[in-house]
Image (cartoon, helix red, strand yellow):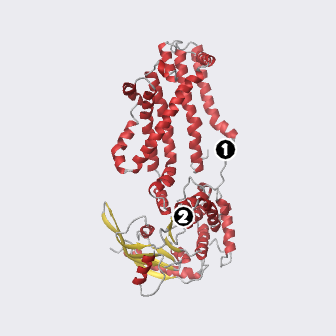
Amino acid sequence: MATTLAKAAEGTTAVAAEPAARIEHVSKSFTGPAGTQLVLDDISLDVAPGEFVTLLGASGCGKSTLLNLVAGLDAPSAGSIRTPGGRPALMFQEHALFPWLTAGKNIELALRLRGVPKAERRPEAERLLELVRLGGAYGKRVHELSGGMRQRVALARALAQASDLLLMDEPFAALDAITRDVLHGELTRIWEETNLSVLFVTHNVREAVRLAQRVVLLSSRPGRVAEEWTVDIPQPRRIEDAAVAELSLEITEHLRGEIRRHGQH
Amino acid sequence: MASTDTAPQAKADDLAGLEAGLDALDAVEIRRTPVREVLVKKVLPPALAVTLVLAVWQVLVSANITDPTKLPAPSAVWDGLADLWLKGTLFDIIWTSVSRGLFGFLLALAIGTPLGLLVARVKFVRAAIGPVLSGLQSLPSVAWVPPAVLWFGLNDAMMYTVILLGAVPSIANGLVSGVDQVPPLFLRAGRTLGATGLKGTWYVVMPAALPGYLAGLKQGWAFSWRSLMAAEIIASSPDLGLGLGQLLENGRNNIDLPGVFLAIILILVVGIAIDLLVFSPVERWVLRNRGLLAQS
């Protein structure tokens, strides 16, 4: 850790804190039956400690691919990705909880794999369930929980990894609108209470603006960083807020422009 | 615009209240089937079917529709059973076969599990022996009796060899298909949590593959029992002790048709009983825990 810190300090003129994730000139291509396809093209992006960044893009922009690369589930074709805080936690669109374990035991498995001693696991799992306001759900089976509750347990399990970087791959896309609103509120609250950095992928512009400090728009085929916005609307925001709507409109115009380009040849 | 009923600034308390409401509305109620319903829906139909078969059988015999030398009366079979019971040998005979079958099954389990895991997880091993392993399932295990007799003679080692050759492929194949059906999402989730390599196998792959593995075990038991009966019928010897297969073979030698029927019924009942008492409850328990059991 110390050496990477030193290197990072050398590389930048300003004395900035080391980023939670540094993506440098990353490209990724896949070789399939139709030949080699470039999915991500020269992406550079930093996530500062404690920063909430949303990655926004239409389908085919490779945003999930980028998240997989940051999570270490796949290797980039070129460039480098560093997450100095160790293996990032990852939340999926599907809850991905293990159905053979209770809600509490799912969290305890994450703790166990992290090396937390046995005696500390149960109290820690219960604390995390309290954090997502599911204090009574320790012994519940996954199929006994609603969609929103499952995603909250999945969030608690991701938090159990005690990583300082949380990657989220459209985690609320399959939820109904009211549940999604509530989970936006919960995520914002938990993000404010902890010093977590979040990289959140979505195709929903309003969701991106509702949550983030910074919105990064990716172009499609191949994915490149097209535009960036800093969101300084104070929290707690709501998805219906006029300021959220206004910025969403501006970003949506850019997104539409990106999509339109693909129909013009 | 359904959510304009709260103040524009959502306070934390509001959020908690809203969340509690949603959780209460969305709570999934799990209902256990009452005993009476189980009796009416699950026990009554097969009991009726068996009674009907027995009744038809008795009528066929009583009305002299069938030749009594070809189809014995149910009462004659019953007398044979009572006879074995009075002689005190009924449970010895059953136990001889069941203990062999279960021990052979446990051996098959101990060999088939690591073998299945190896085939499922190591590409080279799968390419090398995967097809052979699934092909072996279609080979009737009775075919192994002659070589086993030549290898070991008429003893228990021969019996266990036949059971193993019958049951190991089923158990291994069940585990392989169980592993193949593990959703890739679980593997990715496991990897992000740090469950890689052996840890991934132990904490994610094995439990996720459990339903397929159990189906393989059920089939493995059926194959063990069948193989054992084939071995007992073909290779009967006084040294081997009297099991159900020998009982059947003795009935044939003595032209004792009720004895033959009795032996067949006992073989069937034992096979079903082990399945109902051991494998089905475990399977149901596993599926219910995962919410995979259809509520009927």
Q: Quadrant of residue B148?
A: top left
| Residue at mark 2: chain | A
What amino acid does circle 1 point to? Answer: Thr
Q: Mark number for residue B60?
A: none
Q: Residue at x 56, y 12 (%)?
A: B64
Q: Are marks 1 and 2 in contact (CB under 8 Å)?
A: no
The type of residue carrying mark 2 is Ala
Identify the image quadrant of the N terminus of chain A. bottom left
Say if residue B238 shows up in the picture: yes
Residue B266: image x %, image y %? 55, 24
Q: Image point 65% across, 59% down: which residue?
A: A137
Residue B281 point in image, percent of width and height: 59, 40
Tag 2 secondary structure: loop
Q: Which mark is residue B33?
A: 1
- Given residues B68 and A50, the one toward you in this image is A50
> Marks 1/2: CA distance?
31 Å
> Could you tell me residue B119's position as x and y percent?
39, 46
Which of B3 and B44 lies nearest the eye of the viewer?
B44
Left or right of A201 on screen, residue A127: right
Q: Do marks 1 and 2 share a subunit?
A: no
User: Mark 1 packing: few (<14 Cα in 10 Å), some, or many (20+)?
Assistant: few
Disc 1: host chain: B
Q: Kindly report which numbered mark, 1 or 2, lies closer to the viewer in this rendering.
A: 1
Q: Nearer the viewer, residue B9 or B187?
A: B187
The quarter of the rendered structure image containing the C terminus of chain A is bottom left
Q: Residues within 10 Å of mark 2 (few under 14, many from 20)?
A: few
Q: What residue is pinned by disc 2?
A: A174
